[in-house]
Amino acid sequence: MKTFCIDAGHGLHTAGKRCLKSIDPNETREWSLNSRIASKLQQLLEGYDCTTLRMDDPTGETDVALSERVSKANRAGADAYLSIHHNAGVNGGDGGGIVVFCSRTASDASRKLQKAVYEATVARTGLKGNRAAPLAEQDLYVLRKTDLPAVLGEFGFMDSAVDTPVILTEEYADQVALGLRDALVSSFGLEEETMTDEQFDKMMESWLKRQEAKEADQWAEPLIARAKELGLTDGSSPKGLATRQEVIAMSLSAAEK
Ligand SMILES: [Zn+2]
């Protein structure tokens, strides 16, 4: 079973990391945008044969130190590290787009994942932007210090007149999460989890048992009492399910009274 480290960059209160006020009057914090995508991705991956670990504080209160994030990932013996960020640096201009980093000394697996993440998220969001090198190399701490395939994605600019209104939307976050899911599925051959017949039967049996243990609703009580008088039922498990053959037997016995 594969394990993925999902890292929403920074914390809610990290200084400076927010959208440009002239474009977004709420100055939405970068961590909020990062975390929204991270949570959506974790939810999507619940349907696959893998597990996810969060590297940041999911409440956003603490900006977990990068050294802590990295050592947690290395200790976990995980299969990939995915750091989610949003960019800045165009100062209210029109430029922007998605940029995905790996370190200068990245393994082939990291480079393969970098390409997959870039291509899948651009395909899903259409936020291609105008960066000269959207597949970038930089020795960022979490890329350099992790001993597993690692990439860091900057999913649009928080100070771009083009990107910012887009990256604030729920729809955009959904599409980035889907793109990241696509990239992990294709890079690691993840399979969707399906339930076996045996598992389904077990689940249904326990659901039926719970149903049968329930009391009748108040409105049904006098009806059940009357049906007991007529000998149509012994009144047990009023919320249990009846099969067609049981319904036929009850109808006939009522008709013949
Ligand atoms: Zn960031």
Image (spheres, rainbow, N blue to C red):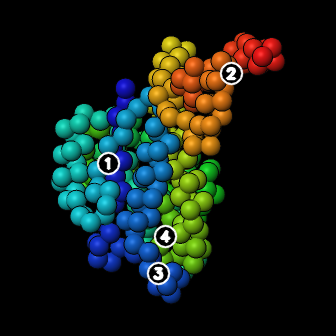
Which element carries disc 4, helix, strand or loop? strand
Mark 3 = which residue? 26
Q: In 3D space, how far apart are the residues under numbered discs 3 and 2 (Cα atoms)? A: 68 Å
- Residue 71 in percent (x, y) is at 18, 46
Q: Earlier in the sequence, mark 4 or mark 3?
A: 3
Which element carries disc 1, helix, strand or loop? strand
Using a 10 Å C-alpha cutoff, classify the residue at mark 4 as few (fewer than 14 neighbours), some (14 to 19) or many (20 or more): many
**Mark number displayed over residue 20:** none
Using a 10 Å C-alpha cutoff, classify the residue at mark 2 as few (fewer than 14 neighbours), some (14 to 19) or many (20 or more): few
Q: Verify CB contact (< 8 Å) between mark 4 and mark 1.
A: no
The C terminus: image quadrant: top right
Q: Verify CB contact (< 8 Å) between mark 1 and mark 3.
A: no
- Residue 239 in percent (x, y) is at 57, 30
* Residue 10 versus residue 152 in the image, above or below: below
Q: Amino acid at mark 1?
A: Arg
User: Which mark's residue is nearer the viewer, 2 or 4?
Assistant: 2
The N terminus: image quadrant: top left
Depth check: 154 or 224 in front? 224
Mark 1 = which residue? 54
| Residue pictured at 48% horizontal, 77% vertical | 159
Q: In 3D space, how far apart are the residues under numbered discs 4 and 3 (Cα atoms)? A: 16 Å
User: Which mark's residue is nearer the viewer, 4 or 1?
Assistant: 1
- Residue 132 in percent (x, y) is at 52, 62
Q: In 3D space, how far apart are the residues under numbered discs 1 and 2 (Cα atoms)? A: 61 Å
Q: Earlier in the sequence, mark 3 or mark 2?
A: 3
In the orientation shown, which residue stands out farthest toward the front? 229
Q: Would you identify the image quadrant in which residue 114 lies?
A: top left
Q: Amino acid at mark 3?
A: Asn
Which element carries disc 3, helix, strand or loop? loop
Mark 4 = which residue? 157
Q: Is residue 176 left or right of residue 78?
A: right
